[in-house]
Amino acid sequence: MEMITYIVLFLRFLQTAAYISLFFFFLIKLKEPAKKRISITVVIYFVAALIYCAIWIFYGQKVAEVLIMPFEIGLCLILILICSADNWSVSLFVMFTQFNLLLGISYLSDISTTQDSGLVYHIEYLLFRTVLFGALLFFNYVYMRPRFRKLVGILGREWRLLAILAFSFYVLESVIHYYPQMYWYEEDYRWHLVASSYLVFLSVYSLIFRSFSDIVEKYEVQERERILAQQNKMWEEHIQEQKNAVNAARRDRHDLRHHYDTLIAMLQGGKTQEAVSYLNAQTKRSESGVLDGICEHLSANVNLSRWAERAREKGIKTEIDARIPANLPMDEVALVAIIANSFENALEGCLRCPDGRKKYITVKIAYSVYNGAGKLQIVVENSCADDIIFESGFPISQKCGGGTGTRSITYTAERYRGMVEFTAENGVFRMRVLLHLLEQDQK
């Protein structure tokens, strides 16, 4: 029976280590290579569990109780050093927050057991903590992580204050639970102190994160407007330049008769070399303005042609199937922004491919109308490297200051009540965009 009790105690410590590590992994940004670092951490935690249980067996429960907090803090610091790519303020905030929640879950599990000691107590305690840990970790991963990562990306020195706040609550909870003696040695379990402190803890956290979330929301709106305005200005200029090039090509074709007259005059005058030079110059000029007849939409046709030309110049096989009508009910600047940003990202992805891998870009764009509602679907697929990292569903750009293009595409999709999806698998990067278009969207 005693051996079984020690096994359950060992499982309890492993459970604590698993909770600590999963809580961190669900919230922090991991260093690369993530799998290797996680494996090292798991081994260290397993060895620490063996050491702690040995202390419990050879030196008794009271010594083990005194050492539990230094053990847990040490394990967290090891995890931060090995795995966390966030700054220390963020990591320490996560560390002390999970300690506060750990103390609360352990307290609830303890007072919920039917016996005060023995094997049955340890088993019930283990089961209660398993349920509460599971619920908390699920909540963290599904609900808290995306919101927390947004805060990490926007807040700066504020994390120092938040880390101090979390540490202060940890000191408070530690005093209430463990000093001058452990709470379970007292008849009332200090329930009124524990309940009051966690009511304050949850209220302060809710107030702070609600305030910061409002700040983040306002910041995102401003950032979205800034990026879209910047992109619109750039692509408006780009569209105008391409339209000027198209008009110049049309004028050249219109003036073709005059060129013929000039060539005939040169040849009749015996100026053969001058005629050849003149013809070569006009040929190059005409070729520079020639556009592929990819689709009926002028701006889309111009940009798809130009980007395809750039890709082919770099030896990248390019295939485009674009069925975009000339009267597409969509702002042409927004359409060009999606095409150009996605093509630019695809081109960059191909150039980062390892040597020997086939480089290609495939673009499929289709517009359809059903029951008076239009849908524009854009799928861009390209070869890519195998080390693409995603965060919150978006690829992390490898170039300094990158990521504006994907955000611009996402904001434009939101404007047209659509969606964007980015995936990378087996050396293939794929972007899917679906837009819902109405007649008034063209204005």
Image (tube, grey):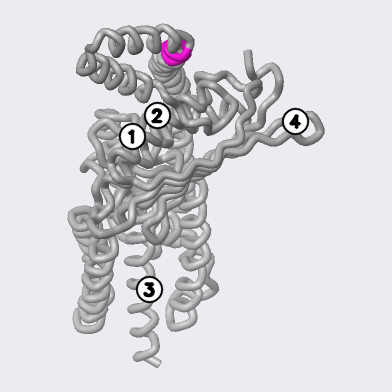
Tell me if mark 1 has few (under 14), some (14-19) or many (20+) residues whose alpha carbon lies within 10 angstroms of its own: some
Label 4 to label 3: alpha-carbon separation: 58 Å
Label 1 to label 4: alpha-carbon separation: 35 Å
Can you identify the residue that label 1 sits on? 310
| Residue in view at x 26 percent, y 75 percent | 46
Tell me if mark 3 has few (under 14), some (14-19) or many (20+) residues whose alpha carbon lies within 10 angstroms of its own: many
Any magenta on residue 252? Answer: yes
Q: Are marks 4 and 2 in contact (CB under 8 Å)?
A: no
27 to 7, vertically: above or below: above
Label 3 to label 1: alpha-carbon separation: 61 Å
Three-letter amino acid code at the position of disc 2: Arg
Can you identify the residue that label 3 sits on? 12
Label 2 to label 1: alpha-carbon separation: 6 Å
Can you identify the residue that label 4 sits on? 373
15 to 303, vertically: above or below: below
User: x and y percent of residue 407 in the render?
Assistant: 43, 31
Q: Which residues are magenta?
A: 248-253
| Residue in view at x 42 percent, y 25 percent | 290
Image quadrant in which you'd find residue 146: top left
Give the number of the disc on residue 306. Answer: 2
Q: Are marks 2 and 1 in contact (CB under 8 Å)?
A: yes
Q: Residue 213 versus residue 396: which sits nearer the camera?
A: 396
SS class of the residue under badge 3? helix
